[in-house]
Image: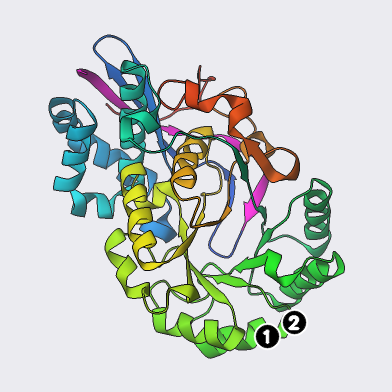
Amino acid sequence: MMLESIQASVLSIPFNAAFKHASAERAFTQTLWIEARARDGVLGHGEGCPREYVTTESLASTQAFVASHTDDWLAAIRDVGTLAAWAHRHRTDIDANPAAWTAVELAMLDLLGKEHACSVEAQLGVPEVAGRFRYTAVLGDASPRQFEAQLAHYIHAGFRDFKIKLSGNHERDLAKTRALTAAGITTDAARADANNLWSTTGMAVQYLKALDFEFFALEEPLRAGDYAGMQGIAAAMNAKIILDESLLRVDQVERFAEPPERWIVNLRVSKMGGLLRSLELVREMRQIGLRLIVGAHVGETSLLTRAALTVATSARDLLLAQEGAFGTHLLAYDVVEPPLMFGPGGVLDADELNIAARSGFGLGTLASLHRAETTS
């Protein structure tokens, strides 16, 4: 493959309804979109979701990363081997710019698959995406009436497990846990995401106990990296801790080997720096016995949903849950038609979509996109 150009732009798609949690409120996507073109005219596309409160990246910083490395990529990358070699040589740079590199890497993998008339999985030598994938009902921070309506909708749709966002407003959060109890949702089917709400273990434990609901897992209750404090919460609440902002690189995995059963990793492809790094993380987690959730940033399009299916397929033995696949349940429009999104019961059936038979990520013709500030 001979690359001709790599073009970066901002993708801004409105949400059908704003989504709120303790760290942010969003009404539009915040997405870096990459279009890679080979000299024969074949196109590949990639997506990354920079989040300041997760990896410190912004749309401006991701565009600057692309601009600074484009000439090098055009000269160096020819196949999966040279793609992986570039990523290995620039590991530290990618550590600081994971969402930016994710968008570029996905575009390259999509392009290579199309050039070789095979799936991304065939290019990487991992299992083809197949079977059914069941997604979690994720409920943002909302008023009690809105929360109850969202919960009722998910239950009616047949969802089996639930994740709620905590706000730090006790009255508001207590209304959420009471709604879960009233709906007959058991504690082993519900987890809570605090988005780094509390500064001390004591504050977190006191607040959580007052909610009178024993979540089986708690995501990021303290400031990112406060591992000892989170272990204390796990013991006090008899719950597992889900690591999101506190686990961004594969070299952080070893610290959770003792005891691995207390920890769950929220693996988001954009946060980890692409598919190759995500698959590397899965291999390391398997070695020490960690379980995982394949997560998603709010506002991901079908492209990152598709990339996450590659990871979920390779990690079925470790997989506790999946998040994302909202498609036009959340977005006013998606980048492909039909979008990859969950249906009744929160299920996405890859066999019905015939994903494995398609080249690259197999997402077909792109819809018109809202772009701005293009660089190449």
Q: Nearer the viewer, residue 365 or 285?
A: 285
Is residue 22 among the parts visible in the rendering? yes
Q: Which residue is mark 2?
A: 212
In the image, is residue 202 above or below residue 90?
below
Say left or right for 131 vs 374. right
Instruction: State how many labels appear.
Output: 2
Q: Nearer the viewer, residue 128 or 15?
A: 128
Q: In the structure shown, which secondary structural element does the residue marked by tag 1 occupy?
A: helix
Q: Main secondary structure of the magenta part?
A: strand
| Res 250 → quadrant | bottom left
Amino acid type, residue under disc 2 in the picture: Asp
Tell me which segment is drawn in magenta: 1-20
Q: Which residue is mark 1?
A: 209
**Marks 1 and 2: CB-CB under 8 Å?**
yes
Q: In the structure shown, which secondary structural element does the residue marked by tag 2 occupy?
A: loop
Residue 307 percent coordinates (x, y): 45, 38
11 inside magenta stretch? yes
Q: Nearer the viewer, residue 362 or 298?
A: 362
